[in-house]
Image (cartoon, rainbow, N blue to C red):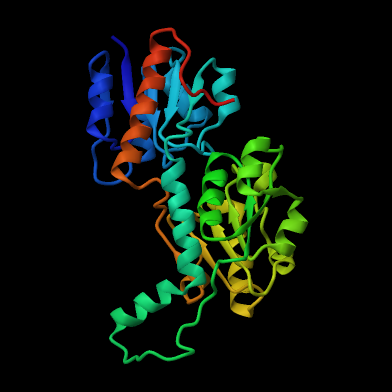
Amino acid sequence: MSRVVVTGRIPDAAIEKLRAEHDVDAWQGPESIGREELLRRVAGAEAIVSLLTERIDAELLDAAGPQLKVVANVAVGYDNIDVPACTERGVVATNTPGVLTDATADIALSLILMATRRLGEGERLIRSGQAWKWGMFFLLGSGLQGKTLGVVGMGGIGQATARRAKAFGMEIVYQSRSEIDSEIAAELGAQRVDLDELLAVSDVVSLHCPYGPATHHLIGAEQLAAMKSSAYLVNTARGPIVDEAALASALREGQIAGAGLDVYENEPTVHPALLELDNVVLLPHLGSATVETRTAMAMLAAENALALLSGERPPTPIG
């Protein structure tokens, strides 16, 4: 029986799955586990089931010890994990792709609708108790029919978002490292373009690329200036893909019409300038926040850990 450390609260079904075969030490505190406590708890672990709130780096891997076999991240993104440090120590890192595709695409489309139709502004107005009445020019937004969605990163979530947008009558362009399947491209009517062209022609730009050195501040002042003044930016990928200071400036100066964010550069802190603006919708990282999706993520992470501990190939290794 191996020792498994779970770094934060996850659905009970996944804990029970792990406990059926191994000794599980699961953090149950109401707040995220502190760094010193985490370093202490991982000592002697053969498997770590981690949340994106925990930094899995060389220090933590060394604190765990040479018997550590697997770090199973309960997330599709893994910028919290130093994958080369894992590889150097013979530790397999895994993530949870696929199971959160629809939930995250739903949030992306929700942000598109909220930003373009000014729904956040309307909801805040009602709750404020201010007087209002219907009028021809009251809180006018922008329709989606016939507009162009630019998808940056056309993986599973990007494709799912594009499929939803097409149902709303949008045209699709995308930028990605490689061509998508020709049948999917034909189904979506999607055209591959470079980032400069995508920014220039899109009415909504939706980010779905992974985060890493190559995509840090991929969208900065120069890229925002290249967008239409009537365009919107949506980010459900990772916060540091967008330069938040540049975005706040672009929104304040009217360089773009609006934005919708579910992720942030220094999460959970949001750039204070964004908090002052009405033309940005701000959500607290809800992309995968459905009971069904979070349970599926935790179960897949558990399956990855169990596979490695049994000497088998995990379902979804990173790389």
Q: Quadrant of residue 96?
A: top left
Report the side of 74 relative to 30 (left or right). right
Visible residue check, residue 33: no
Q: Residue at x 35, y 24 (%)?
A: 302
Residue 193 image offset from top left, x and y in percent: 75, 50
Report the side of 240 relative to 33 (left or right). right
Residue 185 image offset from top left, x and y in percent: 65, 42
Quadrant housing the C terminus: top right
Q: Residue at x 46, y 17 (%)?
A: 314
Residue 133 image offset from top left, x and y in percent: 35, 91
- Of residues 305 and 180, the one drawn nearer to the viewer in this rendering: 180
Visible residue check, residue 150: yes
Residue 82 image offset from top left, x and y in percent: 55, 31
When the figure is inspected, residue 267 is found, relative to residue 317, above or below; the finding is: below
- Of residues 231 and 260, the one drawn nearer to the viewer in this rendering: 231
Report the side of 297 relative to 158 (left or right). left
Q: Residue at x 63, y 78 (%)?
A: 254
Quadrant housing the N terminus: top left
Q: Residue at x 29, y 43 (%)?
A: 291
